[in-house]
Amino acid sequence: MRFLNKIFKFNKLAGNNNLHRQLEKILPFKPQNLSFYQEAFTHKAKRLKDENGRKINFERLEFLGDAIIEAVVSVFLFKELPYATEGELTVMRSKIVNRKHLNELGQKLNITKLLDIKLSERQMGHDISGNLYEALVGAIFLDKGYEGAKKFIYSSMIDSHIDLVKLEKKINSYKSFMVEWAQKNHKDLEFVAYNDSNNGKNNYFRVNFVLNNKKVSHGRSSSKKKAEEIAARRAYYIIQPEKNGKKE
């Protein structure tokens, strides 16, 4: 029994050393309390619990990290855009902290390699990279405080990935953009959805982008919301409202 315990402790120590080495490549400082980072990269599929029965996985740290990221980015935008309104600041923040961007940041850091379990992409989920990025920020906050988390967010996100001029022009949602454009230009816009299943095996939606009773484009996806976004994006490049002027 003592022999098995020694093996267990040795494997855990080896795992800790490996995690520490990997974190030093990612973080702009040396991590101190590895337990926070171990939890940040523990998947719920392992079904781990502490002595009090609390589930141990990255989801709670993901929640915390999400709040810290929003706070740091909000302060950054507040200082950099002194003349922006509350609504404009909110839109800009959503462009920075949206799920797609967080996924890209996590992928660039190759963050999934730090997970303590090997899973297929389907088992991990499409947003695993962004979720782990948030969990890592949560762990950093507990280990190094707000300033440590801020330092990491600036080094991994703000300093190297945010161009405010380009960001202002970036369209976060083509559907929202086209709906607003149609309203400003007094055009009748409608998203017409159909069930487009493949012999009943898979549930798909087909959405037509209809402008002034004329079909402009369509989108197809397993999600109605995604199909609408695809249709709106295609319509945007067909109509090119920005080149033609938002007001016609």
Image (spheres, rainbow, N blue to C red):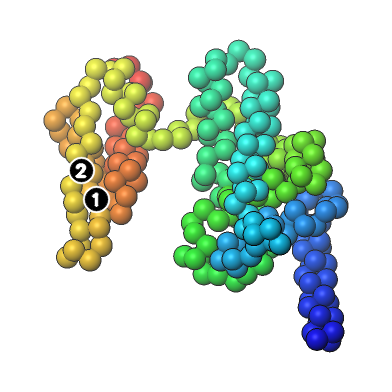
- Residues at discs 1 and 2 in contact (Cβ within 8 Å): yes
Front residue of this view, candidates 96 and 241: 96
Front residue of this view, candidates 162 and 243: 162
Q: Position of residue 196 (x, y in %)?
A: 19, 54
Q: Residue at x 64, y 65 (%)?
A: 48
Mark 1: secondary structure: strand
Mark 2: secondary structure: strand
Q: Place residue 109 in its image quadrant.
A: bottom right
Kindly identify the amino acid type of the residue bearing the numbered disc 1: Phe
Q: Position of residue 122 (x, y in %)?
A: 47, 65
Q: Which residue is mark 1?
A: 205
Kindly identify the amino acid type of the residue bearing the numbered disc 2: Ala
For the question of whether residue 84 can be seen, the reply is yes
Side of 38 where 161 appears, left or right:
left
Determine the CA span between mark 1 and mark 2.
7 Å
Q: Residue at x 17, y 65 (%)?
A: 199
Q: Position of residue 63 (x, y in %)?
A: 60, 44
Q: Which residue is mark 2?
A: 193
Crowding around mark 1 (Cα neighbors within 10 Å: few <14, some 14 to 19, many 20+) is many
Q: Quadrant of the C terminus?
A: top left
Front residue of this view, candidates 164 and 17: 17
Crowding around mark 2 (Cα neighbors within 10 Å: few <14, some 14 to 19, many 20+) is some
On screen, residue 2 above or below 65: below
- Name the residue furthest left: 213
Q: Place residue 192 in its image quadrant.
A: top left
